[in-house]
Amino acid sequence: MRRPSLSRRTVLKAGAATAVATTVALPEAAAAARPDTGVSAYPFPLTAVRLLSGPFLANSGRTQSYLTFLDPERLLHMFRVNAGLASSATPCGGWESPTTELRGHSMGHVLSALAQAYASTGDTAFKTKGDYLVTQLGLCQDRATARGFNTGYLSAYPESFFDRLETGQSVWAPYYTLHKIMAGLLDMHLLAGNAQALTILTRKAAWVQLRNSRLTQTQRQNQLRTEFGGVGETLFNLYQLSENPAHLTTAQYFDHAQVLDPLASNVDALNGFHANTQIPKALAAIRGFHATGTTRYRDIAANFWNFVVNQHSYAIGGDSNGEYFQLPNRIASELSDSTCECCNSYNMLKLTRQLFFTFPSRAAELMDFYEKALYNHLLGAQNPASSHGFHCYYVPLRAGGIKTYSNDYSNFTCCHGTGMETNTKYGDSIYFYNGNTLWVNLFIASTLTWPGRGITIRQDTTYPEAPTTRLTVTGSGAIDLRVRIPGWTSGAQVRVNGVLQGSPTPGSYLAINRTWASGDTVDISLPMSLVLEPTPDNSTVRAVKHGPIVLAGQYGSSNLSGLPTLTASSLQPSSTPLQYTATASTGAVTLLPFYKTHGVRYTVYWNVTSTPTLPAFVAHYPFDEASGTTAADATGNGRTATLAGSAGRTTGRTGNAVSLNGTTAYVSLPSGILAGATAFSIATWVRVNTLANWARLFDFGSGSGTNMFFVPRNGGGVARYAITAGGAGAEQRIDAPSALPAGVWTHVAVTHTGNLGVLYVNGVEVARNAALTTRPANLGTTTQNWIGRSQYSGDPYLNAAVDSFRVYSRALTAAEIASLNSSGS
Ligand SMILES: [Zn+2]
């Protein structure tokens, strides 16, 4: 929320009663009258999912206690005053104070949170409280004309705020506030079955139409320069429900051309824009696509997500510094006490979810981000020491930062409000469906009762403390189960009733399509490893992660004047899950999950001058296993590789080899296989069955921007090794005089030390480049280290057998390469 300068909030603590959940029959979410266009996955209603014991349930309980505690008369006070109705309640403070121009927005958050808490728990006390607020708001709305407002106006401040907005005078963000109230009314209708809430909302929408239809297009666009929240999104949602074309027209009054036009052209012009003002515009756009089928809306939303996630987000998944987007890929240079406003991630997760419905082919990538921001930003933004779930506004990422929180009645910031919403809907993105297809996206202890199918899925887990989860089926029927295999894992295993399933591929979904019976179990193992994730603008500034979980150095009450320097090789796991010890320039330090870091100063980013030392012989895959999806590392270093995409086995140069089919099969090596290496060798046997231009023998990278690869034949008809940290345009290359032959076992090796790279075929040097200044250390910790697959999704897969694949962190000599060739190993 763009806000005027305010004094920092004080942290208060208060006790509270705990809401008691009761089991009652619940209304299903009202079905939309207009089906969404372009959607191929659907959420279960919140009523279908119940959280089990774990950090998410604990967070939810604290927010529920706060909702129970909140005095509705105090929330209603300024609405009644504005409507000329009597109120003797004590006014709220903070952003709800009688003189604050944003007053009334928390009413909307509370309505949404009450509706969600009711749907998530079945506790009717939440619905009763919400129903009371709706009735009282209806009385206030009825007074509009008597107060000289236009029909349908409902707010805690006078309508003159909109006169000021329309005439370019200073006013905070009147539509932002109205959107929150409108969204809360819609949630009370959809999730808590309150009919009057829809009536009030419909009258309010007519008021929005009146105010805007009488403006010129230019006047409306000028007005949109002031933050207006998700009013467009809510109006598209209302149109899907009401089928009233006026609601569509009114929603489109809020299409902000200055922001949407560059996004439609896939141009990142976000620098200098207030972050949380823009995210709801992308949310409105994707709902506009679902409502109208206009692909421009879809592209705006997808392009925006790509920019924010890939070029503007910190390791914890949050974005913005001082609430504003910065230049793309500015992270290490933008660390402060005012990074990562929590509302931004609340809205980015909403956007990610809508894109998941829209782009099933990108599901894994979308949900990897969802998990990142959920665990590392939002889960840890609520203070566990507060029984009322007080919430962060910013999450500081400067070294020595400390989280600060809201309070009962004298804060009411935007993030306090979206925090109430976040912590009452954790059940909404664990499972999705389409027909018999069931996606398991998040590993959160919960039960899913599939409406209308008599099937219950129970998920038992202590994830992420343990990298495992178990699903247990009750009931029977066909389910095409899709288990998310995160991109950060390596060596994942999925077992049904103890039997290993298929070949889980990181960054995809493992499909298990079968008829299930009561008692069937699915055990999922997702090995996590330590990663030092570099920032894009300074590869020595890194965040420490264990699997998806960001770890933070714990500094107690000690402030820091700059980033500590971490000795990477000193990182040692302790016996407590997700806890490490290390040595830094500040001395010995303990690292804990950032989401568990509260009440102390911390650092998320470090200067890392050396990555963990690689052994000279990093990994060796003889591929001699008879079956299965794992390829053992014969060096004993434990860098097990995974056969993916139906990779099989065949007779090798010696023993067996891995067989790659040219369409789906590849081998995935662990993250950071050459992280930090300033020299290396890769040597392997390959028998290409069919040459296809640009098919990769190997491709180690983190996407098309950062990679090192070898192709048996490129578009120019020769074999090539290339490495880049800046996309195809920055590739440094060694081209062979010809392509590799097809149909015969061929030995290939690449070595690199200093600036010299040498390419060998069958033990003999065939080409070199003495100006190779890019080396594996420049690529950071690569996460997509593949044999047979390219970073570019359009390239063909390798059709070949590969045997005895070797990785070294030093350059082998010509004699050593010749020896490997002559020995056949
Ligand atoms: Zn906020």
Image (cartoon, rainbow, N blue to C red):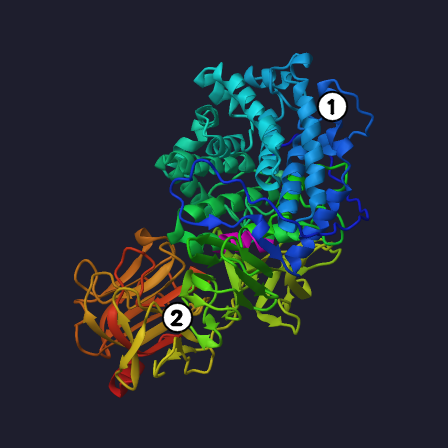
Q: Is the distance from the Cβ of mark 1 to the nearest ligand 1 atom less than 8 Å?
A: no
**Left or right: 508 in relation to 736:** right
Any part of residue 808 in sight: yes
- Which span is picked out in magenta? 368-376
CB within 8 Å, label 1 to label 2: no
Quarter holding ligand 1: top right
Pointer 1: what residue?
Answer: 80
The location of residue 19, given as percent across then percent down, is 74, 49
Pointer 2: what residue?
Answer: 503
Give the residue drawn at x 32%, y 67%.
Answer: 756
Q: CA distance from mark 1 to mark 2?
A: 62 Å
**Left or right: 485 in relation to 795:** right
Q: Is residue 374 magenta?
A: yes
The location of residue 217, given as percent across then percent down, is 44, 18
Any part of residue 782 in sight: no
The image quadrant of residue 598 is: bottom right
In the image, 43 versus 606, the foreground residue is 43
Up the image or down, 434 lies above or below 639; here it is above
Q: Where residue 110 is drawn, which disc sits there?
A: none
**Left or right: 376 in relation to 513:** right
